Amino acid sequence: MISYDRLVAPRGHLGVLIEPSPAEIFALLGEVQQRLEPITILGRPLTAWRTNLRSQLELNGPVIATGHQTEFFHAGVFAKIIAAHVLSRHTCGSAVFVAVDSDVGKTRSLEVPQITSRSLRRVDVSIPGLGTLRPDECQPEVPREQWVDFFFRVASVYEHYDVSMLRPFSEGWLADGERIRYCDGLARGFRALEAALGLDGVRELRISELCGTPAFRAFAAQLMLNAESSAASYNAARQAFRERHKVENPARPVPPLVTQDGRIEVPLWIMRCDGPRTHLFVRRSGEQLDLLADRTFVTSMDVTALADREMHDQPWELERLGWRLRPRALTLSGFARLFLADLFIHGIGGAKYDEVTDDFLARFLGAPPPSMCCVTATVYLPLPRTGVTDEQVAQARWRARDLLYNPQRYVCNPSPDLLRRRAELIRRSQELAAHDYNNHTERRAVFDGIRAVNEHLLRQDSWRTAEFQQEIERLQHAREQDAIALNREYFVGLHLRHSLEELVSRISRALTPETLEART
């Protein structure tokens, strides 16, 4: 079992998190069949659906799967690909990367650090043709020269371009075609990067591809035909997670499914490539099941036909009409784990949220899906750092404040008369506080007197206040510079080859059975 408390990103360079322990991960692979036995989909054993899907995809042996959105992801995500490669080699199985091309991109640019003569800064390099309203699978083709220009702009900003993994990545991206789709270029780029590091056995499977299989159609049908039960199970699992982890944000970990006006929300997206994704609702009308994009009617499906396993061998009518069903976050990992993977490797966010998936599917199907584990890493870019700490900034702020109240500690050659006057006022203030506390008029007069003396002392060394403020600004700027340098989420291709080779080596050593035996 994953320990929730251990799901924290490593702080040090080339730090790796593997949870649960590698020994436990190998043990989990022996529990898959036992977990699957109670589950049926449309009255057919889940094991039969899995066998057919894996045969269709030509996957052999234990399937070690991981995945992420189709984006320029960081080294922590890449660590999951390394782990999938290593585990598949040791188990004589297949490594799969599930590319979530059904998501809408969070950004239209690649963030690149730039070292200038004065400072370190972040530069956003626009990604050609990429819109944030359409899912990535629907992004248009872009002329090759625009991608050439994109990588040229990245190279002009990034000082370490020539010795980074961007060179093989960009060469892979540009290897084929005069017009290149975003997801196609990304896939080729990552294949080239992985090959350059010796990771040549990880196969990409896109969600858009998986959603065209009989297995996914059957899974979607199970959710739609049992919409009331699936929504209740989903919401109960969500609420249990919120109570267990004391979550207050109503949108976390996911919004609840809605039942309203005879419509029941299903944890699937419905979309067309010429429009945005929309929540799928279903509504029962006799022997027909109405499908709605939010409140907009899409089509009706015959309930008996939908429950027929043979129907899902061919595209549904709504697919032929240009509509697409895609899984939402929890159903996405649920489908991958139920139908595809013997072990699914999550990052920290996915591992946390999949507590809900386990609970949801156990309530809805009678058993949780095959196990998951968590792998991530922290790799820093070779960028200049100051080493200034938050404690140093706090101390500088305290000194600036203390200067206002105790200038005698800091000014040069303070006036003896002012020091004597200040000492007398301090003594009188202490007497009033001890023996005449309610004499507010005199206490206020003494306070104003101390403040006036402090101001006179500061005027004797007028540059001291500016000096202290400048020190605060210097330290704050240094912390901001270090925050740029120590960002662990820069694109993995920006890293130097030797850093990623060392990451591969560390994960490989940790997940090698011989190493585990030596430890025990």
Image (cartoon, rainbow, N blue to C red):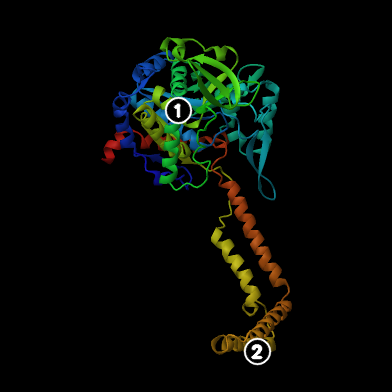
The CA distance from mark 1 to mark 2 is 82 Å
Q: Secondary structure at mark 1?
A: helix
Q: Where is residue 420 drawn, in percent x and y?
A: 65, 89
Q: Where is residue 379 drawn, in percent x and y?
A: 50, 41
Which amino acid type is marked by label 1? Answer: Glu
**Is residue 221 placed above or below 72 in the rendered structure?**
above
Residue 16 visible in this rendered orientation of the protein: no
Is label 1 in contact with label 2 (beta carbons under 8 Å)? no
**Is residue 447 placed above or below 364 in the rendered structure?**
below
The residue pinned by badge 2 equals 420
Along the viewing direction, whichever of 251 and 458 lies nearer the viewer: 251
Pick the quarter of the image with the C terminus. Answer: top left
Q: Residue at x 50, y 36 (%)?
A: 256
Pick the quarter of the image with the N terminus. Answer: top left
Q: Where is residue 222 drawn, in percent x and y?
A: 43, 21
Along the viewing direction, whichever of 91 and 434 lies nearer the viewer: 434
Q: Secondary structure at mark 2?
A: helix
The residue pinned by badge 1 equals 228
- Report the mark closest to the observer, 1 or 2: 1
Task: Tell me if mark 2 has few (under 14), some (14-19) or many (20+) residues whose alpha carbon lies within 10 angstroms of its own.
Answer: few
**Is residue 462 placed above or below 97 in the rendered structure?**
below
Q: Quadrant of residue 28?
A: top left
Which amino acid type is marked by label 2? Answer: Arg
